[in-house]
Image (tube, rainbow, N blue to C red):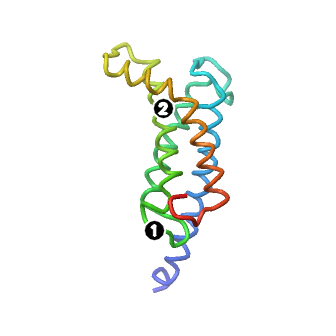
Amino acid sequence: MLLAQSWPLVYHEVMLQFYLLSIVLNVFLGCILAFCDGETEQGAPAFTLNNETLRLVAGGFSIGVGILKLLSPVANSVPVVGDLFPALANLAGGFILVFEFYRNRSSLITGAVERLGDFLEKNRRFTGFFCLTAAGLHFIAHQVLFL
């Protein structure tokens, strides 16, 4: 009985954590994609933006947060549509970082993978600014539909 009464409060508290994670990850991914080149160093110090392991973890974590943001809106917003813009930014930025890791590590690269990699590399800065814009708009106007 007590759990059933406190469930909306617990649900709201968890969603605020995803809200914060989405904003922080979008800012982080936006800085990496917009201002850093695609070159990574395997032996780079752990907390530099050129560390490929840090980029892989941030990308994978961002994809997970993007999926969860699609499934769980904040503060009585419309499900799926309510947080569409920041969730898509998380998914796009995370996918680019995970794909770059795969492309740098894989020895088997087909023509389709090469074309996709070229397309993502051309739109890397645009995606970074998209992530930064999504973070800023979601922070300022979190209850607006699509933001």
Q: Which residue is mark 2?
A: 96
Which residue occupies the foreground of this view, 41 or 109?
109
Closer-to-camera residue (126/113): 126
Position of residue 13 measured from the top left corner of the image (x, y, whole percent): 58, 68
- In the picture, the quarter occupied by the C terminus is bottom right
Mark 1 residue type: Val
Q: Earlier in the sequence, mark 2 or mark 1?
A: 1
Q: Which mark is residue 78?
A: 1
Which x, y percent locates residue 78?
45, 68
Could you tell me which residue is drawn at 64 percent across and 25 percent down? 36
| Label 2 secondary element | helix
Disc 2 residue type?
A: Ile
- Looking at the image, residue 44 sits to the left or right of residue 73; the answer is right
Side of 14 where 112 appears, left or right: left
Residue at the spot 56% in from the left edge and 31% down from the top edge: 55
Callout 1: SS? loop
The answer to whether the residues at label 2 and label 1 have Cβ atoms under 8 Å apart is no
Could you say which quadrant of the image residue 81 lies in? bottom left
From the image, which quarter does the N terminus lie in?
A: bottom left
